[in-house]
Image (cartoon, rainbow, N blue to C red):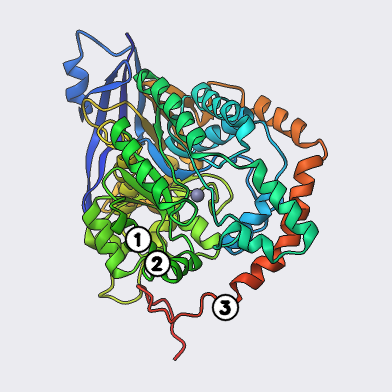
Amino acid sequence: MSTSLVRGRYVICEAGVDAQSSRVIPDGAIFQRDGVIESVGPYDEIKSAHQADPADVELGGAGFVVIPGLVNAHHHGRGVSTFQMGCIDDCLETWILSGWGRRPFDHYLMTVYTAIQMIESGTTTTMYNHAQTPASGLADDLSEVLRGFADTGMRTAFSVYFRERNRVVYQDDQQFIAKLPGDLAESLQRFLSAVNLSEEEYFSVFRSLHQEYAGRPESRVTVLLSPSNVHWVSDDFLLRTKEEAARSNTAIHIHLVESLYQKEYGMRTWGHTPVAHLNTLGFLGPEVSCAHSVWLTDADIDIMAGSGATVCHNPSSNLRLKNGIAPVNAMLAKGVNVALGTDSTALNDDDDMVQEMRLAAKLHRQPGLQQPALNSHQALRMATANAARPTSWQDKIGVLEPGRFADLVLLDLDAMTEPYMDADIDVVDTLLYRGKASHVDTVMIQGEVVVRDGTFIKMDKSEVLREIKEQFSRPVEGQALEATRLAQGLTPFVQEFYKDWGKAEIAPHYGYNSRV
Ligand SMILES: [Zn+2]
């Protein structure tokens, strides 16, 4: 049995209960027992209710604001970022290629490092989407990633993405290969064969992981299905995923219309948008979450809202990879559940969700008095209650109330407001205007304190960094070097492929400037 009492000058219990406000208790407290919140209320009341049964420890105090643990709703690991590995930001379609030549890395170490970074900036749950690695080592890679998350205490909605077609450009792999010079074609053929994974292998990996974790609710892991994107798998695979999700009572995570070209692929292939295509298949539903969803039409937004699907908004990544700005205001107006994630490509090249919330809040401020502007309450909700929904813990995290897991974060409000803050300013605005990862003082996941005084305490971070440095000091060789050369050779052909794309007339949801 372990209990704690967590006190804050403000306890933000639930962000964005309506479009303009959050449920906040001034001088509030939370009493948790064995990882589950037992009561939330004014500090004096909670304290006196436990006079005969005092908490083992008391955390926080008048200098802190307490918030629900943040949920990063779209993430691929990569603590040492793609940029640190040598890939400069570019258009998604060529940037993906540049990642092919990344040096091999230790999945356990990389996961531990990325989880520590996220936890130290207030994230307690991540929706981790494993980029397909060679089938031969996949099971080992996955168990190393899961071991990494488990050792850090991070709650993880875990999925492996499946991608089996249109892998270089949005065209059949063999058709594209046929137009390449002989040596490049051969090299590409070899590269793609090495990452081939059959549907049977995919579902077998999913089932064994899902069974393993469904029977261990204390594990802090849920296992989701993940077709990588509508154009990267067959319609049959999408339908099979939908059936498997219903059978296993789990959720589905997919990338969707991340780029202008992905929307255009739908128009060229089916004569309608990818969202309309998914709708025709009957794929969308409340169990589905869609990363990015940047290039949505009004009709697409209606479909998404009607289906109950979640959109995982990734503002940093969309800016960095030249994918534009998702119509979040329009989605919220129609009632779409919009969550927030960093896609491992955050603006500061870290996974700081406090910064990501701020970017979202500032990005969706449309010019003009009558135009909508995302506010602090909505932005915080996107990283808490809304982001909880697609993780399979929708009733367990994201809000501080009795019966939910004690996943929470204390931030140093004194430091955030130094030397003065007008008394009329809402604490949620203060957090969204001035909060930084460096203000995170304490992080609790399922009642367990994992960050104290701003430092991760379950492991020695400096030792993790030392080991990564050591491993990364070795020269890149063999297959990674070959893949880099392959990607460099392919890039001009990829650019040539898209030269007639992206010419359709566009009527944007937001008007940020004008030419005439
Ligand atoms: Zn992604």
Q: Which residue is mark 3?
A: 500
Q: Is residue 422 visible?
A: no
Q: Which residue is mark 1?
A: 277
The residue type indicated by label 1 comes to His
Query: Is disc 1's CB within 8 Å of ligand 1?
Result: no
Disc 3 element: helix
Q: Is residue 514 visible?
A: yes
Disc 1 element: helix
Q: Are marks 2 and 1 in contact (CB under 8 Å)?
A: yes
In screen coordinates, is 14 left or right of 132? left
Q: Position of residue 297 (x, y in %)?
A: 33, 69
Q: Position of residue 219 (x, y in %)?
A: 41, 21
The mark total stands at: 3
Q: Earlier in the sequence, mark 2 or mark 1?
A: 2
Q: Residues within 10 Å of mark 3 (few under 14, many from 20)?
A: few
Q: Are marks 3 and 1 in contact (CB under 8 Å)?
A: no
Give the residue displayed 50% in from the left and 64% down from the top. Answer: 323
In depth, the one of 52 and 163 nearer the eye is 163
The residue type indicated by label 3 comes to Asp
Q: Which residue is mark 2?
A: 270
